[in-house]
Amino acid sequence: MQAFDSDYDEPVINAVRQLAEARGVPMAQIALAWVLRNPLISAPVVGATKPHHLQQAVDALALRLSDEEAAALQAPYTNAGPSWF
């Protein structure tokens, strides 16, 4: 069972991938940069399982997304609720 990805997630993943490729950074940095700019998230959780994940998280602190980039990441999002029910 894949509890954290569904068909609803694919357009968002594609938007993150496209921006990461345009910026020349890993997708994780784009995702963390979005989390860090989101005022509704007070404590981002970094699920590092390998040493390079920690470096990517640190590097995301310096990555600033423009309003247009953030909007492009949010545009394909559809609130479908939890996929594991």
Image (spheres, grey):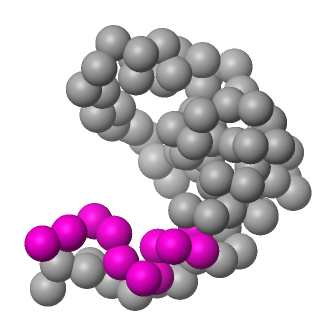
| Residue 81 appears anywhere in the view | yes
Instruction: Out of 20 and 82, give the one closest to the viewer.
Output: 20
| Segment colored magenta | 1-12
Tell me if 47 is positioned left or right of 25 in this view: left
Question: How many dots with numbers?
Answer: 0
Q: Give the residue displayed 68% in from the left and 62% down from the top.
A: 15
Is residue 39 in the magenta section? no
Residue 43: % across, % down: 38, 37
Tell me if 68 is positioned left or right of 24 in this view: right
Q: Give the residue displayed 62% in from the left and 64% down from the top.
A: 14
Compared with 8, 19 (above or below) is above
Figure quadrant of residue 48: top left
Q: Give the residue displayed 63% in from the left and 54% down from the top.
A: 16
Figure quadrant of residue 61: top right
Figure quadrant of residue 68: bottom right
Residue 3: % across, % down: 20, 69
Residue 80: % across, % down: 40, 87
Quarter of the figure with the N terminus: bottom left
Quarter of the figure with the C terminus: bottom left
Compared with 53, 3 (above or below) is below
Q: What's the magenta bit mostly, secondary-structure-wise?
A: loop
Residue 60: % across, % down: 60, 26
| Residue 39 appears anywhere in the view | no
Q: Give the residue displayed 58% in from the left and 68% down from the top.
A: 12
Tell me if 84 is positioned left or right of 63 in this view: left
